[in-house]
Amino acid sequence: MKIIAGPASQLLASRVAQQLGIQPTICEYKQFPDGEYYTRILDDGIDDVTIIQSTPQDSDLIALLQLIDACENAPKINVVIPYMGYARQDKVFKAGEPVSARAIARTINADRVFTVNIHEKTVLEHFNADSFDLDASHLFGNYIRSLNLKDPLIISPDAGALELAKSASSDVGIPYDYFEKTRHSGDSVTIKDKEIDVVGKEVIILDDMIATGGTMAESIRMLKEQGAAEVYVACVHPVLARNAVVRLYNAGVTEIISSDTLEKAQSKITVAPLIADAIKEL
Ligand code: R5P
């Protein structure tokens, strides 16, 4: 089995390979003067391959498609997309829109596809491959326990992340609750007023992703008003677009915690064991 580390997942793929006791295959990535991308796998052995590449930017999807194509002669191609861009456009919200997640899934030509806490599991149905979503919730539960908080409470900022919060909390016996959110635009949301007993507690708001930080900033504000002692935010996918980090600190966050599906300074939890275990089971 060869492990191929896409340009957006170099650290995660290296961690997965380390857990499997192999070295990732070296690849060459460069850009032509006209902006097009060049990709080359520097190993022409014919083996099963696992390509690990998140796709936060459109150029990352191009790299993934190029890597898959370069592996055309491999007996089996496994593709791990730890964070899949466009997964939130999983249906037609307004007439005339594409289901972008479907459009992208249809471009992936592989035997198996793995994602990690994908925004909506129905997206998996659009891959022309056996597809699996890996769940990082217990890794978050363990990390939260390791913080040794005195009186913690896990909260999901909307109904969509409730399962994640429930699962992370049940692993470590920490109570959980949830808010109800309405989105008005890409970076504007309102959270319905809900009285939760948070006075003096350390609250961890857990969501699948933080993009603009709007959801988390609004939740932090509400929790602080209600008397929470400290508010941590945690997410699987730290998209952290534009000034999201500053927005969260301005709102009073104690710490931002995320996994390494996207490699950021906040990526304190690695999903490598999840991926390595899934590969071992093949
Ligand atoms: C949406 O349903 C997701 O679970 C996240 O809550 C959302 O993507 C976060 O976006 P933002 O950080 O821009 O509020």
Image: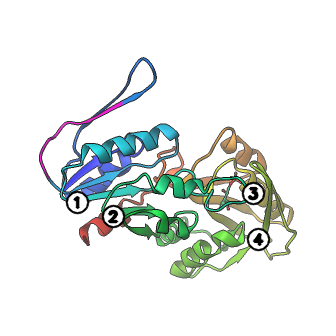
| Disc 2 and disc 1 in contact, CB within 8 angstroms | yes
Q: Give the extent of the magenta segment.
A: 38-46
Mark toward the start of the polypeptide (4 vs 1): 1
Q: Nearer the viewer, residue 90 or 154?
A: 90
Pick whichever of labels 1 and 3 is earlier in the sequence.
1
| Badge 4 element | loop
> Which residue corresponds to mark 2?
112
Residue shown at 63% from the left, 63% from the top:
207
Q: How far apart are marks 4 and 1 (CA)?
A: 43 Å
As drawn, is 107 to the left or to the right of 222? left
Question: What distance separates the C-alpha of mark 2 from that of mark 3?
Answer: 31 Å
Of labels 4 and 1, the one closer to you: 1
Q: Nearer the viewer, mark 1 or mark 3?
A: 3
Image spot of residue 171 (x, y percent): 51, 79
Give the label on residue 179, or none. Answer: 4
Do labels 3 and 4 touch, CB within 8 Å?
Answer: no
Quarter of the displayed picture in which ligand 1 can be seen: bottom right
Determine whether 37 is above or below 96 in the image: above
| Disc 3 target residue | 94
Residue visible at 58% across and 59% down in the picture: 235
Query: Residue 165 is drawn in which quadrant?
Result: bottom right
> What residue is pinned by disc 1?
76
